[in-house]
Image (cartoon, grey):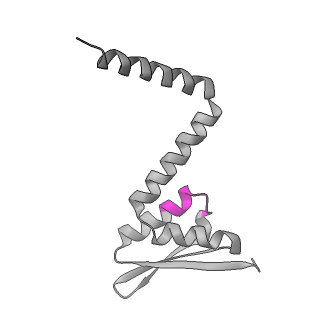
Amino acid sequence: MSDSMLASATFPSLKAARSARERLARAGFARNSIEIDRHADAFEVSINTREENRGRAERILTGSPLGNDFRQVGEQAADFVQANQPLALGLAALAGFALFSLTNRR
């Protein structure tokens, strides 16, 4: 890759480094471009990627694992709703009816 850029971050444990590698892979980065190197008591995760993807890779590496997981779940939910609009509308109507029934009990 002649136009590749390096994004990297250092983690205190191998488990944290592997978790970062998994987040990158789930985000669509190629596994063979992600490397974990040991430096003394820390582990460095680095990835060679195109310049336009470097910022996204750095956000994944340095961001909160929980925040990244929530963001990914939200994107998947939005994609599902877009792909299945009639089903989503039906479920929303059903949820609204159930909520209305629960609040109007005597």
Q: Is residue 91 above or below residue 72?
A: above
Q: Position of residue 105 (x, y in %)?
A: 26, 13
Q: Is residue 85 above or below residue 29?
A: above
User: Considering depth in this image, is 99 or 50 the residue closer to the camera?
Assistant: 99
Look at the image and give the residue range highlighted in magenta. 22-30
Residue drawn at (54%, 63%) of the image: 24
Q: Is residue 90 above or below residue 84?
A: above
Give the residue furthest to the top. Answer: 106
Q: Is residue 27 left or right of residue 104?
A: right
Q: Position of residue 28 (x, y in %)?
A: 61, 58
Q: Position of residue 27 (x, y in %)?
A: 57, 58
Residue drawn at (39%, 58%) of the image: 66
Q: Is residue 7 above or below residue 40?
A: above
Quadrant placement of the C terminus: top left
Picture quadrant where residue 11 is located: bottom left
Picture quadrant where residue 49 is located: bottom right
